[in-house]
């Protein structure tokens, strides 16, 4: 492994690929962009929700909850049909039309953080409506914060939070998705390489059988109401398994609808056009073939070259696994209103995550019966890879059908204005 890393680091192509640094000028430009919102023009793999793509997305995350996957079952629930897993909303987007980007904004963005490695380190969600078949999702987004930190793993880094406001075809805010991104210099991360001593996980038949036992015991609360009155502080949310992680899992996630647009993996002529559009995103592999920088999620040699022992998952995969864990526990009638998660460790190929959670508190607020929960993912090395908290509105004897929270007025007005402008410009 160390020899393979050395070969890559000494190659001319690698030296070109990592010859980018985080500069004070880029940091200053990034901070000037804070607060500027723009209509998102990306055309994701999924633009309008359907029964089929909702099911395919759930299956791509290993989720078979009938509320998402079985129309006959879902028609008998409070929703009257299938709804999308909450975090699927992040992967649905039709281009929103908006006014041209001002020249000063274009200048600030030009080649900003060019060649700098970016990974998702966590997120925060606020949910306001379900996504149903027939819903088209638009969004507008902008950076909210920018901090500079010294990282033990990657030296100088930038921590940036981007807010994505997800809006349906009626101009209603469906969710607000805040993404925590970490920007690091590829060369610095590779030279640190403190994780290169981690060996790939292997399992005996007995160890794998223990994982299978966890899967076999998992249950979906489903139609059986989890009453607010029956929940107490300290209650367990149960145990689930996620893994062992394979490249197949990453493929399934992409096939289920994770496009990663505008950096989506493409082939042949489309790949050629993408290489012309964003050449810095393509780095030659050991065979001299330019390939996407994001291949660190399935290419072990490239992952090693930037300081990791092997390929690893997308952080958003575990965020979707988190939502599955919550929805399995809470039942069909409950609503996840808020989630905050931190991706604290990489999830490498072969790693198995054990997911557990507990009730932190219960409270009544604005007529809603809420429970606050904490969830953690722990891998087979005993490391906590995800730490999360969430708020869930549960049914109660006095309020059997909890409702989503109201959208803040200023945000609702801005969403309506953005969609009105979209229609004025001839949007579909």
Image (cartoon, rainbow, N blue to C red):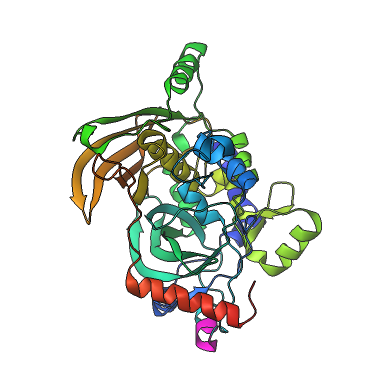
Task: State the residue at coordinates (42%, 65%).
Answer: 163
Q: Is residue 189 magenta?
A: no
Q: Foreground residue, 229 or 126?
A: 229
Please, is residue 79 above or below residue 187 in the view? above
Q: In the displayed image of the protein, which residue is found farthest to the right?
A: 269
Q: Quadrant of residue 372?
A: top left
Image x and y of residue 398, in percent:
23, 43
Image x and y of residue 419, in percent:
52, 75
Please, is residue 94 above or below residue 28 in the view? above
Q: Is residue 106 magenta?
A: yes
**The C terminus - image quarter:** bottom right
Task: State the residue at coordinates (46%, 20%).
Answer: 211
Q: Is residue 82 visible?
A: yes
Assign the magenta stretch its main secondary structure.
Answer: helix
User: Which residues make up the magenta segment?
Assistant: 102-107
Q: Foreground residue, 276 or 64?
A: 64
Q: Is residue 299 visible?
A: no
141 sits left or right of 299 in the view: left
Task: State the residue at coordinates (43%, 49%).
Answer: 192
Q: Foreground residue, 14 or 22?
A: 22
């Amino acid at each position: 492994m160390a020899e393979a890393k050395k070969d890559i680091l000494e190659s001319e192509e690698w030296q070109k690929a990592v010859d980018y640094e985080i500069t004070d000028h880029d940091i200053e430009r990034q901070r000037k962009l804070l607060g500027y919102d723009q209509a998102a023009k990306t055309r994701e793999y999924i633009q309008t929700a359907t029964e089929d793509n909702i099911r395919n997305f759930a299956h791509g995350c290993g989720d078979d909850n009938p509320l998402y996957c079985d129309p006959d079952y879902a028609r008998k629930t409070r929703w009257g049909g299938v709804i999308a897993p909450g975090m699927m909303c992040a992967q649905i987007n039709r281009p929103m039309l908006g006014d041209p980007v001002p020249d000063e904004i274009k200048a600030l963005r030009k080649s900003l953080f060019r060649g700098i490695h970016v990974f998702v380190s966590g997120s925060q969600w606020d949910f306001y409506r379900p996504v149903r078949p027939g819903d088209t999702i638009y969004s507008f987004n902008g950076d909210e914060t920018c901090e500079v930190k010294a990282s033990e793993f990657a030296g100088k880094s930038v921590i940036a939070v981007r807010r994505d406001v997800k809006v349906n075809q009626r101009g209603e805010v469906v969710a607000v998705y805040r993404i925590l991104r970490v920007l690091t210099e590829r060369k610095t991360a590779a030279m640190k390489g403190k994780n290169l001593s981690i060996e790939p996980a292997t399992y005996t038949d007995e160890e794998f059988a223990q994982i299978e036992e966890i899967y076999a015991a998992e249950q979906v609360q489903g139609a059986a109401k989890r009453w607010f009155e029956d929940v107490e502080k300290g209650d367990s949310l149960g145990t689930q398994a996620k893994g062992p992680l394979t490249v197949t899992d990453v493929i399934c996630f992409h096939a289920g609808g994770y496009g990663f647009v505008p950096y989506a993996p493409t082939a042949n002529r489309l790949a050629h056009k993408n290489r012309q559009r964003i050449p810095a995103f393509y780095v030659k592999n050991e065979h001299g073939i330019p390939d996407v920088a994001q291949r660190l999620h399935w290419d072990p040699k490239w992952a090693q070259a930037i300081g990791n022992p092997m390929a690893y998952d997308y952080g958003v995969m575990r965020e979707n696994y988190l939502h599955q864990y919550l929805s399995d526990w809470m039942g069909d009638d409950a609503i996840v209103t808020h989630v905050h998660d931190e991706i604290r460790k990489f999830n490498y190929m072969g790693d198995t995550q054990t997911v557990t959670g507990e009730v932190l508190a219960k409270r009544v607020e604005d007529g809603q019966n809420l429970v606050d929960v904490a969830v953690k993912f722990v891998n087979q090395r005993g490391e906590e890879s995800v730490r999360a908290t969430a708020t869930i509105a549960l049914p109660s004897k006095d309020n059997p059908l909890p409702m989503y929270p109201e959208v803040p007025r200023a945000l609702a007005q801005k969403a309506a204005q953005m969609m009105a402008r979209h229609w004025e410009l001839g949007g579909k």
